Structures are given as structure tokens and as C-alpha cells.
Amino acid sequence: MDRRQYLYLVPNRSRSWIWPALVLAAAVVMYVTRVGTEMADFGVYRTAAVRALDAEPLYRADDGHYQFKYLPAFALAMAPFAWLPSEAARAVWFGLSVALLWVFVRWSLLALPARHRSLQGLAWLTILLMAKFYAHELNLGQSNILLGVILVGALLAVQRDRPGWAGLLVGAGVFVKPYAVILLPWLLPAAGVTSGLAAVAVVAAGLVLPAVVYGWAGNGDQLLGWFRTVTDSTAPNLLGADNVSLASMWAKWMGAGAMAAQLAVATTIVLLAIATWVIWRRARVSGPAYLEFGLLMLLVPLISPQGWDYVLLLGTPAVVCLLDRFDLMSPGWRAVTVVAMAFMGLTIYDLVGRALYARLMAINVVSVSALALFVCLAHLRRRSLA
């Protein structure tokens, strides 16, 4: 091997600080100029943590749009932020979210098996296409990045044959965002019974943990309050511009009502059937877990009735997989992938203008694009490309 080949293969350690420094600088500018005065969803978490520490009810209709919609254990997990002054808590959460975003993207890249493109190229393209979701998440102070890191950690545990850890992490993810339950059935073919049992054990423990604060009856009341809050707040949010769920898509196309709800359920069943078929064909490829994981993560904002557009950041592994296998697809499938990625990731108010943005969101073009990428992923498995 000559010197030029060696230098190409060995990373330049003297420049390893550049990207973290740029990310840090961008994060500081973002926080100082805008985010520091916003982060409304983080305020919901902190308020819930304060209430949990005082054994007060978590779920209150008079909170309006900013009701707490997570399981009681998450309110207890956020307790350290209740002990900090509001401004300090906000800054710490933002810094933690930026660091976790770095980890989430990096782990999503490193977990991809049999990679065809360079890490740097994949990173640039992924960030370009997903930046609007990342920025919106940080601006709101949401917790989907935290969930993404936990669940990608579970994927890495599956790949490294650590089923117990995979189950523990998926179980923990349920309390950050309940829709992590979509991975529970997948654990059985991907990591075995031990993983599934570990996940169930963590979920069971997390459901009873708040009884330490609320008592058994009080904890039951909080769980019922959570269920009522989630179900009662679904219908009013269906027609929100940023709602990309299947329920929202059909409601916007046909008008909210029984027919739209039935079509949303039918579409969900079809998508879950396709996901099951993809997993059934896992023996035809090496390293099948990554595509399956990406497919299920892309489903989350679609099948959750309150699937806001920024939740699509969980589709990062799906985008990474499609970008990496892009050259292996036929021209027709490449065209579908390009168009879908462009509409999903580049439908941005500042980019397309007020009128076009409003029209595109009114017809849920982002949802349709995510569905197209879901089909493209299934196509990769059909051809045994991932």
C-alpha cells in the first residue's frame, strides 16, 4: 500500500475537532437568537415533573393545547429539570438534545451494514434532507431525539447479539414516547424471546413505578388520565397543518368522520402487513435488522393519530438506508425515491413560500412522500438489497 492509499484510509485526527466545533457554534447561535425563548414542549415536561414531585395530577384539560400526553414515569424521569431554575433547565435540555442529535445521526450511519457510500457523503445528504425536522424538534424542546438515540441503541444491541439490552432499551423508549411499542413484536424475530421478555418487564416496572409517589390508587388514576388525554385530544388535532398521520391525511382529503377513520385504520393494517412481510423475508439477506428497524421508525408518525411532521426525524435510518442503496435501484425506483425525499424533507415554508407551503400541507404531501419511501424500503427487501 502506497502512502496516498494509507492517508485515504486513515482519518485525519488533526481535523476531528472541526465538525463538533461547527455544530456547537451553530447550536449556540440557534439558542441565543431563537430557541432560548421558545421550547414550549419542554415547558410541558418540566411542569409535569414539578407536579409529579408534589404528587399532583399530571393530566389537566385546562392546560389546553399544552397538555402532558406521556406516561407518568416520564414525568418522574424529568425530575432533575424541575430542580433547576427554568432558564437553566431549558439551556441544559437544549444542549443535551444537540449532543443526542449528533449521537443519533452518527449511530444511524454506523449501524448500517454493508455500506456502499462514504460516511461523510451519507451524513451530508441525510442532514440536508432531515434538517427541517431536526430544527423543529430543537425549537420545540421535544423528546423524539432522545427516543431516537434509545431505539438506535436497541438496534445496535440487536446487531451485537445483546438481546437483553435491546429489550431493556425498547422498554425504556415506551416511556419517552409510547409509540415505541411498535418495536416490541419485532424484537422476537430480531433478538429472540429474552429480548421480548426484558422489554415487557421494563414496561411493567415503569407502569407501576409512579405508585411510589402517587400510591396504587393514585397511579391508576394517573394512567386513566393519560388515556383520556390522549384519546380526547386526538380529534381536535387531526386537521392541524403539521399533522402527517394517516388519520390526518384521510380527514383532510375526505373530511373528518367515520369514513376517513375507517380508511386510516385500513391503511394502517396494510402497512403493518407489508412490514410483517418484510420481516418474514429477513432470512434472504445478511444484517436484516437495520432495514426493518428503519421501516418501523418511518411508520411511527404515520400510524400515530398525533404524528406531527417533526416526528419524521425518527425516519433517519430509513433515509440513510435508501441513500446508501440508491445506485442499486432501477431508474424508476430512483425517481420515486428522489421525488419522495424532496417533498418530505424540502417542503419548507421559507423555501417554497407561504401559498405553496399551505397548499402542500393541506393535501398532506409529506405523508404521501413518507408512504412512498416506506414502499421503496419494502422494494429493497424484495430485491434482497438490504
Image (cartoon, helix red, strand yellow):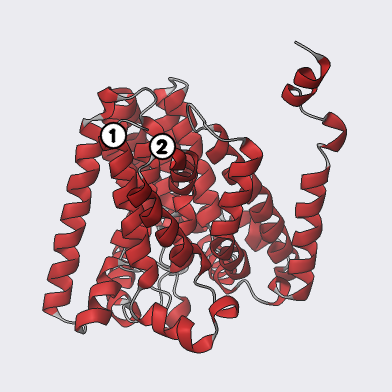
Q: Which residue is mark 1?
A: 383
Q: Is residue 108 left or right of residue 204?
A: right
State if disc 2 and disc 1 touch (CB < 8 Å).
yes
Residue 35 appears in which quarter of the rendering? bottom right
Q: Residues within 10 Å of mark 2 (few under 14, many from 20)?
A: some
Q: Quadrant of residue 367?
A: bottom left
Tell me the tag on residue 328: 2
What's the CA distance linking mark 1 and mark 2? 10 Å
26 or 179, which is in the foreground?
A: 26
Residue 90 visible to an observer of this rendering = yes
Image location (x, y in percent) of residue 320: 50, 44
Amino acid of disc 2 = Leu
Q: Residue at x 81, y 58 (%)?
A: 25
Tell me the mark number nearer the camera, choosing from 1 and 2.
2
- Name the residue: 40% across, 84% down: 359
Q: Residues within 10 Å of mark 1 (few under 14, many from 20)?
A: few
Name the amino acid, label 1: Arg
- Residue 102 vertical position relative to residue 8 in the rendered view, above or below: below
Q: Residue furthest front?
A: 331
Could you say where residue 218 lies in the image, as x and y percent from the top left?
36, 61
Residue 122 placement (x, y as % from top left): 58, 43
